[in-house]
């Protein structure tokens, strides 16, 4: 297993671990404020945290500056490294998650994760307002996605995912890869809930989608949303 770190923008990085056996990448998103405080969306697996730290340090990002953790749902790849981050950080760390997820995090890790309401916007730093959109049963009942209001970026967790390595932000049409992943892994339990989530997401102007598996997406955003709304689940 090998992870690599990529710069997306001046203050946004992706650390991506590719697991050959699964044919799947696992992405963590790192947002950095002017004063170098770090917000991490998806923690990655606990056992890969040292590698994440090495990659961050290699490009001058200090893991001890992690100040905010965002957990899109209660699953190992999304929240496994929470205790390691709490150990390594010098900050008073805020953990944001769906209310059901915070209940699990607080019980298992003895944390004080903060529940976020549906469509709640939290200002992380100047120029970074994050909107938390609950996406029930996509693919867990405590799922949410995160929208960076100023940058028009959607961190879509397990929506719009594709197999294969992270290759940057694709402008070509990736719908067949997205649909293949839904059909192959069968990770979405309900089309009704998927459509509800897509309608809520569609209320926001999105320029880039960054899923936690596979590559980023730009262009064709309305097309992706419409295609998944019309997807035949049978
Ligand atoms: Fe998941
Ligand atoms: Fe995932």
Image (spheres, helix red, strand yellow):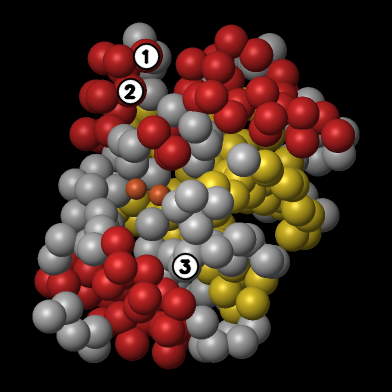
Q: Give the x, y percent position of residue 64.
A: 71, 19
Q: Nearer the viewer, residue 47 or 145?
A: 47
Q: Nearer the viewer, mark 3 or mark 2?
A: 3
Q: Residue at x 67, y 33 (%)?
A: 52
Residue at label 2? 105
188 with respect to 169 (left or right): left
Q: Nearer the viewer, residue 19 or 187?
A: 19
**Viewer-nearest residue: 131 or 172:** 172
Residue 35 image offset from top left, x and y in percent: 81, 33
From the viewer's perspective, tell me whether residue 31 is left or right of residue 188: right
The percent coordinates of residue 110 (x first, y second) are 35, 10
Which residue is identified by label 1? 109
At horizontal 49% and vertical 32% (from top left) the residue drawn is: 45
What residue is rendered at 44% in x and 83% in y? Answer: 175
Q: Residues within 10 Å of mark 3 (few under 14, many from 20)?
A: many
Q: Which residue matches tag 3?
A: 162
Q: Which is nearer the N-term, disc 3 or disc 2? A: 2
Between the C-alphas of marks 1 and 3, the distance is 30 Å
Q: Of all residues shown, which one is farthest toward the front?
A: 21
Query: Quick one: SS at disc 2?
Result: helix
**Where 61 sits versus 151, above or below?**
above
For the residue pair 214 and 115, the one nearer the viewer reads as 214
Q: Which quarter shows the C terminus?
A: bottom left
Confirm whether residue 31 shows in the render: no
Q: Is mark 1 within 8 Å of ligand 1?
A: no
CA distance separating discs 1 and 2 = 6 Å
Q: Is residue 98 above or below residue 130?
A: above
Q: CA distance from mark 3 to mark 2?
A: 27 Å
Q: Are marks 1 and 2 in contact (CB under 8 Å)?
A: yes
Q: In the rendered image, which quarter is residue 116 located in?
A: top left
190 on left or right of 13: left
Badge 1 vs badge 3, beta-carbon distance below 8 Å? no
């Amino acid at each position: 297993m090998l992870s690599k770190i990529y710069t997306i923008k001046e203050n946004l990085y992706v650390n991506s671990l590719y697991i050959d056996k699964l044919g799947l990448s696992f992405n963590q998103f790192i947002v950095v404020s002017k004063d170098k405080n770090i917000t991490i969306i998806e923690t990655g697996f606990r056992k890969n945290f040292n590698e994440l730290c090495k990659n961050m340090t290699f490009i001058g990002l200090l893991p001890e500056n992690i100040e905010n953790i965002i957990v899109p749902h209660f699953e190992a790849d999304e929240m496994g490294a929470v205790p390691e981050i709490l150990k390594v950080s010098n900050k008073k760390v805020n953990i944001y998650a769906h209310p059901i997820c915070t209940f699990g995090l607080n019980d298992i890790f003895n944390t004080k994760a903060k529940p976020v309401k549906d469509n709640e916007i939290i200002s992380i730093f100047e120029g970074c307002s994050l909107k938390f959109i609950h996406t029930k049963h996509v693919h867990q009942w405590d799922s949410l996605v995160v929208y960076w209001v100023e940058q028009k970026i959607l961190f879509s967790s397990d929506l719009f995912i594709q197999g294969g390595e992270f290759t940057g932000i694709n402008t070509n049409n990736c719908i067949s890869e997205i649909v293949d992943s839904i059909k192959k892994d069968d990770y979405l339990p309900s089309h009704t809930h998927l459509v509800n989530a897509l309608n809520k997401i569609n209320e926001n102007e999105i320029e880039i989608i960054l899923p936690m598996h596979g590559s980023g997406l730009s262009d064709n955003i309305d097309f992706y949303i419409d295609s998944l709304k019309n997807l035949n689940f049978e």
